[in-house]
Image: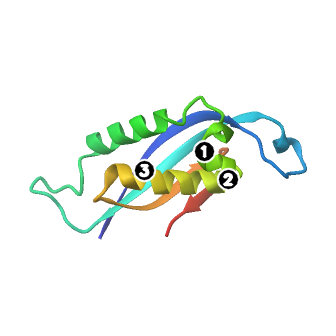
Amino acid sequence: MFELSIRGDIAAAHFLRKYEGKCKNLHGHTWQIEVFIMGDQLDEVGMVVDFRILKKKLKVFLGTIDHICLNDLPYFQKVNPTTENLAKYIYENFSREVAPLKVSKVKAWESDVTCVTYYE
């Protein structure tokens, strides 16, 4: 089994509903996003998938949530746009973008010392 990872980043704003603390106010982060892909088959070149393809797909996908207020997305009107829920959102939605490849997990770094990993 092989596990590949690619990284990108987004700068986005958000605020947390029903939260007592500074994060209840509108503020922003530059999240570092790392997506992991699993595969057990190699193509004729010896790759699970060409990194060039994955990087392009991730760049396009992250572009849809870059420089926005996450609270404005329908998904985040139902749940708070915490880093936990952001990692889950990326996992679920990017999985559709790269199918039939398998996203094994997503890491979302809110800062250089704090991150969340989501997997199923």
**Mark 3 lies on residue:** 94
Q: Amino acid at mark 2?
A: Lys
Q: CA distance from mark 3 to mark 1?
A: 16 Å
**Mark 2 lies on residue:** 78
**Residue for point 42% across, 50% down:** 94
**Residue for point 18% across, 61% down:** 42
**SS of the residue under disc 1:** loop
Q: Quadrant of residue 44?
A: bottom left
Considering depth in this image, is 58 or 95 the residue closer to the camera? 95
Q: Amino acid at mark 1?
A: Pro
Q: Position of residue 11 (x, y in %)?
A: 60, 32
Q: Is residue 64 above or below residue 119?
A: above
Q: Around disc 2, counting alpha carbons within 10 Å, would you say few (fewer than 14), some (14 to 19), or many (20 or more)?
A: few
Q: CA distance from mark 2 to mark 1?
A: 7 Å
Outermost residue to the right: 20
Quarter of the N terminus within the rendering: bottom left
Q: Is residue 74 above or below residue 44?
A: above
**Residue for point 63% across, 55% down:** 85
**Mark 1 lies on residue:** 74
Q: Closer to the N terminus: mark 3 or mark 1?
A: 1
